[in-house]
Image: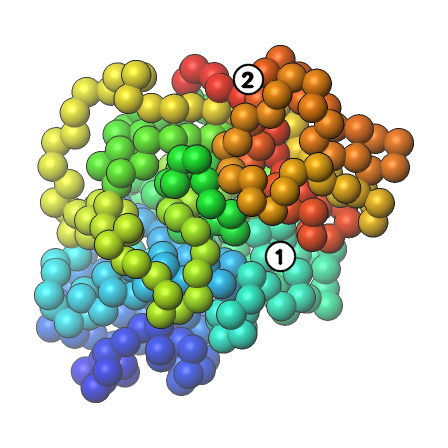
Amino acid sequence: MTPFAPARDFLHATLDGRFAAPRQWQTATLSLQWLAEGVLVLAPLDAADTLDHVLLSTGIHGNETAPIEVVNSIVNDLLAGAMPLRCRLLVMLGNPVAMRSGARFTDYDMNRLFNGAHISQPQAQEARRAAELERLAADFFRAAPAGVQRLHYDLHTAIRGSVFEKFAIYPYTDGRPHKREQLLWLESADVSTLLLHSKPAATFSYYTSHHFHADALTLELGKARPFGDNDLARFAGIDRALRRLVSGSTPPLPAYDASRFAVFHAKYDLVKHSEQFRLHLADSVENFTALPHGMTIAEDGDIRYVADGGEERILFPNPKVGVGLRAGIVISPCQLD
Ligand SMILES: O=C(O)CCC(=O)N[C@@H](CCC(=O)O)C(=O)O
Ligand SMILES: [Zn+2]
């Protein structure tokens, strides 16, 4: 009997705070472990050790609700036996406190607190949560035998509209190659735009990529809207691809062809060094907007960020971030290695 009965709803069980403490139970076909608030491991009862280990995280930013709804629906269908499970699946609803208040975060941006960065913000509830998520992800991936695929998709939506509505972010790979199979899987989820990060970061996807060599990606799937305001039809591609992934029914994917993908790399971050930071882009400017050569993108005291070459574009411009944090990324087109 699932503790979610009668509603059998993972999201509401999390937001209601009904299951703060760990517990485990079984359905007719699954073993379930509720490891912490909003953190659930699902495995087939007859699971072989060699199954893929898949981590789906969402709600790391509490107001990015559409992917939370997508993942919730998949978990509920698995729990109800409406869909088979053919992997070991760890699901994390990242920031329930912020989700309850409809905020990106309450104390500090959680996706700047992984890789041990939580130590620098001990007062933030997100720091305690990031440490907890790190530990639980580590336990999960460390238990995967050598040779088993480790996957991590961290699902987000963006503050601004975007020239390319859906895109994926490949964390810095520490020199490991970018995998074509990951791009092909993304394409099956209607995502064919990719940003390659060029340095380590305190994000969740870099954490699992760096420490466990997971094939980890941050997915940006549309614009952030409150619960109830999402047009889930716009998320049909990721819903379909994730359902196929966890149920082992991904069809053979077409051969890789670079011409079907738009690939960019991160050139540098606009860093907000002080409260003098001024962004010279209107609130209506979308992600991936081109930056004409010579344009002053932002200023911060004596520092001027000036566009160079005519091929650069802006991603995630946000002058409201805290001092010391990234207030945007300047990107440019590139080829996959
Ligand atoms: O729309 C925005 O400004 C931010 C959307 C978002 O949360 N993006 C992630 C990207 C993570 C990465 O760069 O790897 C973030 O900022 O945490
Ligand atoms: Zn986000």
Q: Identify the colour scheme used.
A: rainbow
Whether the residue carrying mark 2 lies under 8 Å from ligand 1 is answered with no
Q: Which residue is mark 2?
A: 311
Q: Left or right? Give the position of 331 relative to 300.
A: left
Q: Position of residue 252 (x, y in %)?
A: 12, 31
Q: CA distance from mark 1 to mark 2?
A: 30 Å
Snapshot quadrant of residue 33: bottom left
Snapshot quadrant of residue 237: top left
Frontmost residue, 237 versus 305: 305
Question: Which residue sits at x=88%, y=37%?
Answer: 301
The quadrant in which the N terminus is found is bottom left
Snapshot quadrant of residue 76: bottom left
Whether the residue carrying mark 1 lies under 8 Å from ligand 1 is answered with yes
Callout 1 crowding tier (Cα within 10 Å): few <14, some 14–19, many ≥20? some
Residue 275 seen:
yes
Q: Amino acid at mark 2?
A: Glu
Is 239 placed above or below 264 here? below
Question: Which residue sits at x=38%, y=24%?
Answer: 262
Frontmost residue, 194 versus 288: 288
Q: Which residue is mark 1?
A: 109
Q: Position of residue 195 (x, y in %)?
A: 47, 30
Q: Amino acid at mark 1?
A: Asp
Residue 59 seen:
no
Q: Earlier in the sequence, mark 1 or mark 2?
A: 1
Frontmost residue, 209 versus 326: 326
